[in-house]
Amino acid sequence: MPKPSLSFRDPAGSCCVLDKSVLRFVDRGNIEEFEGFLNTRVARTCVERKDLVSTRRLNEPEIEALFASSTLKPILEGRPNSIVFEHERVRFQSFPYEWPTEMLWGAGRLTLDIAISARADGYGLKDATPYNILFRGSKPIFIDALSFERRNPGDPIWLPMAQFIRTFLLPLLANRKWGVRLADVFVTHRDGLEPEELHRLCGSVEQFKPSLLSLVTMPTWLSRKAEENEDKIYKPQILENSEKAQFILESAFNRLSRNLESLRPAAQDKSNWSEYMKTHSYDDPAFSAKEKFVSDALKRFAPARVLDAGANTGHFSRLAARLGAEVVSIDIDPTCVGQIFAKASEEKMNILPLVVDLARPSPSVGWLNDECPSFLDRARGAFDGVLMLALLHHLLVTERVRLEQAMELAASLTTSILVIEFVAPEDAMFRRLTRGRDNLHSTLDTKSFEAACDAHFEIIESLALPGTKRTMYCLKKKSLN
Amino acid sequence: MHVFAYIDPGAGALVWQSIIAAFVGAMFYVKRTRKVIGAFFKKAFGNGEDEKPAEPSVEILQRTSDKDNG
């Protein structure tokens, strides 16, 4: 087992992700508060509804068993003052830089709902970041059970409000107003966007628009004042009248809800690729043949976990999900991925759609490059079925990846099946991508493709799509021995 | 032991939240006074029905979750 990485920011405890579960180490001093929260009505309801991960305190024999692992032993020994809990694990981790805006919005909604609901039981969230949320299919789930703390009823201020604004509202605002991609925000900024960063983008009149005034302009202007009165502003302001404090807090949450609602992503505009399913380069018989080929392959091998690489608007992801697979769909186009998410949420399908470019996958991010594993670290070997439909020619032509390299990557992603579409250089879409550089791919044909497959796969079935220069292949990974 | 929030509370955003809190705090007394006067008139001239109780937290979750998941 590789060395599990540990979370470290919260002084109340840490957690480490294992293959099948997540261990949570809670400092003895925080046990009462932590278990107190787990026993609240809101926590139990959230777990029941799968809005919050389930948590179980490990007993002595279970902890003894963990000591048997050479990787876990030093971690346990280094935490003599901790109580060990176990969370269920969300199978495929994803991070805000891989989400379309629809998913960040959904994560923000869940964060706010949980923070609001927890108040009734005297608890509140002590942080409000998208890293507290993962997605199971298209459904967000709150994973940081240690984020809850008892609130003083007289406290009218929610300290994480600024973090909620930085990590949810401002990235959504920047995306809507200036087309800033979430990857551009979150790969380089752990804690989202500062109001000052957006204020620089605002015009002199624009800054007074209601949508910007409260979230961007006022906090920017007031930050200077804050620097002058540092001692004063960070002092807790506890009111004697707790009814008044709760009234103020409720109003603050209502304001955040309204802000979030105003930033709800609308049905997206068309992008380069979102209309592909209507305008793709084959006619209906060829498309029907392709659909049947993919469907037959999925029925025959029944993969449980499918990666649809280059998913476009998710037609084949939905096909796989309907056949019972747990699907991760990736595409470079956030508009397409947003559409997959919207449809998967609507139809409650087990599809996790992510904005990932297979030729430039998400890197490992964070402290020591060890907080959020890279996409390939998470994806390699995580699927027993991979679909690469109408994708290979983009890798070969646009990205200038060699055929052998592309097949090697595909072989590292799947443990069993690969359904891949070969697009010949004579194909109209292929030629559009080459932009006159046809000679670069003059040796590429089905023969050279099949030879490249042979290094990792055996060909189970192939089908030339009628009236096109495309051939479908169902490949089975060769076993190593 | 109480663990204080360890996240960055922001600077300008926190001052802005405090200013609004002071304003909303003043509104609290205005609303309460209005409520007392309203209740008085209701009692004097109305049918004396109680106000609806606040919705429990579970219902908030129920509602929003239904919305999220279509």
Image (spheres, coloured by chain):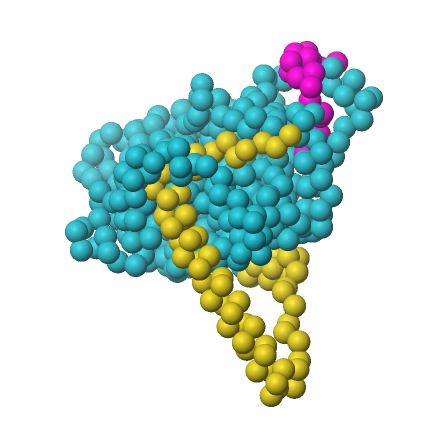
Chain colours: A cyan, B yellow
Q: Give the percent coordinates (x, y) of residue A365.
A: 43, 27
Quadrant of the rendered structure where residue A348 is? Answer: bottom right
Q: Is residue A291 above or below residue A29?
A: below
Closer to the camera in the image, A384 or A331? A331
In-image side of A167 versus A474 (left or right): left
Name the residue at 33% across, 53% down. Answer: A214
Q: Give the percent coordinates (x, y) of residue A13.
A: 61, 26
Q: Quadrant of the C terminus of chain A?
A: top right
Closer to the camera in the image, A23 or A343? A23
Q: Which residue sits furthest bottom?
A: B45
Name the residue at 64% across, 57% down. Answer: B57
Q: Is residue A43 magenta?
A: no
Residue A165 appearing in the image: yes
Name the residue at 20% across, 39% down. Answer: A435
Closer to the camera in the image, A352 or B17? B17
Q: Which residue sits furthest left?
A: A204
Closer to the camera in the image, A144 or A118? A118
Residue A20 appearing in the image: no
Q: Quadrant of the N terminus of chain A?
A: top right
Q: Is residue A69 magenta?
A: yes
In-image side of A299 versus A435 (left or right): right
Q: Give the percent coordinates (x, y) of residue A262.
A: 39, 59
Name the residue at 22% across, 45% down. Answer: A201
In-image side of A153 versus A407 (left or right): right
User: In the image, which residues are magenta?
Assistant: A68-88
Q: Give the percent coordinates (x, y) of residue A119.
A: 60, 50
Q: Which residue sits furthest right?
A: A61
Q: How many marks?
A: 0
Q: Is residue A55 above or below residue A468?
A: above
